[in-house]
Amino acid sequence: MAIERIKQEIIQDEANQAYTKSGIHPLFQANPAAKLLIIGQAPGQKAQDRGRLFADRSGDRLRNWLGLDEATFYDATKVAILPMDFYFPGRGKSGDLPPRVDFAEKWHPQLLAELSNVALTILIGRYAMQRYLAIDSKTTLTEVVANYQQYLPSYFPLIHPSPRNQIWLKKHPWYEEEVIVALKQRVSQLLV
């Protein structure tokens, strides 16, 4: 299968050798049958340690937003997950470091070519939105998410489901009252 071949190329890539030599494998979920694609930032330390994406409180919140149980979320024939980097980038002063700049540029096109059944791509956070929606640095995340309808039917932008965004969620009740309701409806229709 082409996806397995691509995975082996990622493992063997010189840019990823520090991870490979440490026994760390790239974290992504992909199957040609998937109808829903989630593009997020990069795995956190917990995800990398557990070998499973969104295996934390952020994942619990994301599954709630999508209206999906764990079994469906981790079923690669239904949901593909391609972070902007497939490895934990490390810690910075105020949280995790950003995904490596050239990682998605190199590997996403190859994997996306294998995901021909994807009908909706959920973009989580600024890095994914900048790459796939071509938003400029002056456009705020809040503006993009508030205007989610202009990116449909292909893309659905979301803020990161991290507990660190609790204050943002309290300041913007429309997000859960309108955006998440619309998201659940679309996901439900897609994965019937």
Image (cartoon, grey):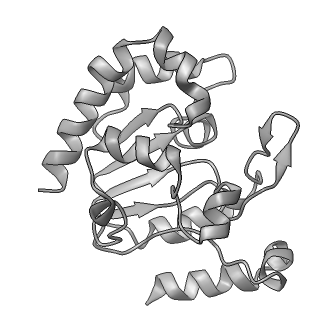
Please give the name of the residue rendered at 53% of the width and 61% of the height, measured from the top-left corner: 53
Establish if 116 lies above or below 163: below
Residue 173 falls in which quadrant of the image? Answer: top left
Q: Is residue 188 above or below residue 78?
A: above
Q: Can residue 154 be spotted in the picture?
A: no
- The answer to which image quadrant residue 126 occupies is top right
Question: Residue 87, how many percent across, how many down?
Answer: 70, 64
Name the residue: 75% across, 84% down.
23
The residue depicted at 37 percent of the width and 75 percent of the height is 31
Instruction: Identify which residue, 137 or 80, lies in the foreground.
Output: 80
Q: Is residue 85 left or right of residue 38?
A: right
Work out which quarter of the rendered image holds the C terminus and state it.
bottom left
Looking at the picture, how far across and down is residue 98, in whole percent? 75, 45
Where's residue 140, x and y in %? 60, 18
Q: Quadrant of the N terminus?
A: bottom left
Image side of residue 79 versus residue 16, left or right: left
Q: Is residue 151 visible?
A: yes
Q: Nearer the viewer, residue 83 or 163?
A: 163
Q: Looking at the rendering, which quadrant does residue 5 occupy? A: bottom right
